[in-house]
Amino acid sequence: MLPVLLLSGLAAGVRAVNNGLARTPQMGWNNWNSLGCDVSESLLLDTAKKLIDAGLRDVGYNYVVLDDCWSDGRGSDGYIRVDKVKFPNGMKSIAKHLHDNGLLYGMYSSAGEMTCARYEGSLDWEKQDAESWASWDVDYLKYDNCYHRGRFGTPEISFNRYNTMWQALNATGRPILYSLCSWGEDYVHTWGMSIANSWRMSGDIYDSFTRPNDLCICTNAADPHCVAPGSHCSVLNILNKVAPYADRGQPGGWNDLDMLEVGHGGMTDDEYVAHFSLWAAVKSPLLIGADLRHLDAKTLTILNNPAVIAVNQDPLGRSVTRVRRDTDVPKDKYGVGETQVWSGPLYGGDEVVILLNAVGEDLEMSTDLNEIFFSDGPEGSAPQTKEKWAVYDLWANRMDDGTAQRILDAPVTELESVFSKANVYNSTLTPYVEGLKAGDERLMGKKVGELAPGGELKATVPKHSVKMYRLKSLENGGKRYSIHRDEL
Ligand code: GAL
């Protein structure tokens, strides 16, 4: 076995930060997308309760992340002060409450003299601020990029600025997940993995699937002329920026496509399904951005789909990559239109496939085993193309709205029985890796067909939506192991 393991390690180029965190992409909630600066202790505690009661903690969303606007200047001792009106009991008491409830606490600052909303920043105060997070028992730092006093422009300058906080976090001795928010600047995908658990690849997401916006002019994360990653970036804009670098994520460090807009209200249900599926399969952190105090049934049934989350939390930790992009297709009302096919390896030799229809009308789409396994050998040379595969639809077992509504309406005393009747997956009790090893049906989706060697996978994909499948080999009792796809 040893040579195989060594080969696997080398093939995957395993190098990442050594804090032991984010072996799979982090999951949780962050207030920014829906609430901006409207933050308070009660918001965090109410959200924590909702994460638990709606069953979201127990499908994996365990970080509660407070974004910008929580501080009140810096004291003469050099330590940052907490806004006592918004957080009357301080940060440590919030951390304790979250920890007592099986959750973890994330906070925010900027590698600049101010945060983006112009609160106190941590630039040149890294040591003091890291000490504060550690003393408050914080588990996660999102570290932004505003007001950096011009200290950017080359990968090395940005690396050094972010590395100072990484060193300061390390020096505290507390494992703190380090999430860079430098919007893809200075080729962060080339150095982020050396010091951080995730790195943002774009300016801020907004609640639209394809709508272009002048505030988000960059379409290519590596374009040196793209000096303003901006905000108001659509789902498709971000996806297209990440596509050339999708393979940079690995256990311990991930491309961050930005927080989820699912449930915010600006997209259709199909668009949110597509957004969630793609973020999951590209192995982005999954941070819910909706105000969970007003969670509705449809939103819950997207966020709690264990078959899709299992792809995100897959122990192999490999992103899907894009194997086809067609732009010569009809356009939507914003003049945008394209189709894409993505595929990638999963635990045990399974494969995930996504057909994306970003066109303004429903389409027949198809791909075949040669294209799906392109990365394992072009032009049909991959051994997988000669096998038979079972096809599982990862959205076919989506929870029905009635069940979701019963969960949302149930008094706390009845929740356990509602969860058990609905047969919901509980990753707190059975981590995804265990469920996958056991072949738990809830993580597999629904079998919808089989592919013969070289076979074609066809589907009608509604406009602005996806079809998402797990392929399972029908050879060797359903387990297809190969050297470089083995579990590390
Ligand atoms: C942006 C960041 C957002 C949010 C915001 C807070 O730079 O990308 O995710 O944190 O700042 O002001």
Image (cartoon, rainbow, N blue to C red):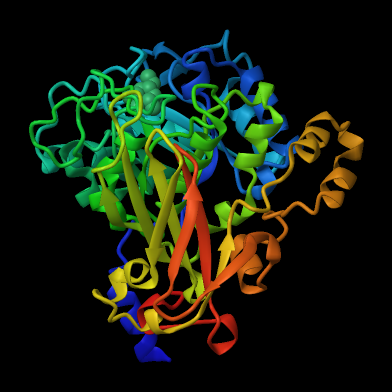
| Residue 446 pos. (x, y %) | 65, 61
Residue found at x 45% / y 34% = 259
Residue 293 location, quadrant? top right
| Residue 326 pos. (x, y %) | 27, 48
The quarter of the image holding the C terminus is bottom left
| Residue 19 pos. (x, y %) | 41, 55
Of the pair 52 and 280, the residue shown nearer to us: 280
Q: Is residue 315 above or below residue 24?
A: below
Q: How many marks?
A: 0
The quarter of the image holding the N terminus is bottom left
Of the pair 63 and 135, the residue shown nearer to us: 63
Q: Is residue 213 above or below residue 399?
A: above
| Residue 487 pos. (x, y %) | 46, 75
Of the pair 32 and 277, the residue shown nearer to us: 277
Can residue 245 be seen by looking at this rendering? yes
Instruction: Tell me if 283 is positioned left or right of 443 in this view.
Output: left
Can residue 283 be seen by looking at this rendering? no
Residue found at x 43% / y 62% = 317
Instruction: Tell me if 174 is positioned left or right of 450 in this view.
Output: left
